[in-house]
Image (spheres, rainbow, N blue to C red):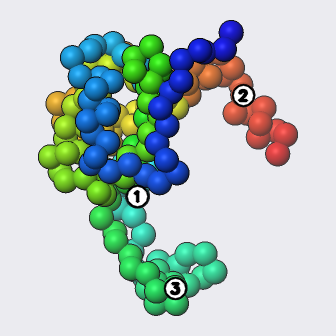
Amino acid sequence: MQQAAIIERESAGFAGPESLARIAACLEGKRGVEGVLDFETTGTTPWARGNKLGDKIGLKQTLKQYCAANGCVYDDALRARVLSLHIPSDAGGLSIAVDLDRLTADERYALAGLLDGQIWVGHNLLFEYMWMLSLNPCVRPMRLVDTMLLTTCIRPDAMYRMQQIV
């Protein structure tokens, strides 16, 4: 059965602080809204250290050499860069990717706070939860639906079968 409601989608670019009101309209004052979320980050955890300027990358250049050759800068600050969020149509309907670098610390805190008491759906939600806590340490989901855990429960041999194929 196809969903009849239309879900509002953000344009091709990433959303910024102007999107907070639209997200709040879908979630504020509601508990138990199911939402799919995914972070894009600069590290594996908020506490891990990443590459240093002397480390080799790609074609055996150091990060410093790569940046000089390509006219870019390297920022080793660990942070969540983008939060992708999908809210189903029965809760207001919104699919959005928020550029967290465009938000102030207070706006990131408020955005994370909107997800407090909601149902989070995603793949490997421990990763998302660690990063969410780095934005707002008070956030607690009502429930987690972790597709990685579900896959492991249903097909515990799946990883080993894939390794045998490759």
Reading the image, the residue beneath label 2 is 158
Residue drawn at x 17%, y 51% as measured from the top left? 105
How far apart in space, not on screen, are marks 2 and 1 (Cα)?
28 Å
Q: Is residue 1 left or right of residue 84?
A: right
* Amino acid type shown at disc 1: Thr
Residue at label 3?
A: 70
* Residue 102 x %, y %: 29, 57
Q: Residues within 10 Å of mark 1 (few under 14, many from 20)?
A: some
Q: Position of residue 118 (x, y in %)?
A: 32, 19
Disc 2, SS:
helix
Vertical position of residue 105 compared to residue 139: above or below: below
Task: Please give left or right for residue 41 compared with residue 11 in the image.
Answer: left
Q: Residue at x 50, y 27 (%)?
A: 7
Q: CA distance from mark 3 to mark 2?
A: 41 Å
Indicate the quadrant containing the N terminus: top left, top right, bottom left or bottom right.
top right
Q: Residue 135: x, y in percent?
A: 23, 43
Q: Which mark is residue 42?
A: 1
Viewer-nearest residue: 66 or 94: 94
Marks counted in the figure total 3
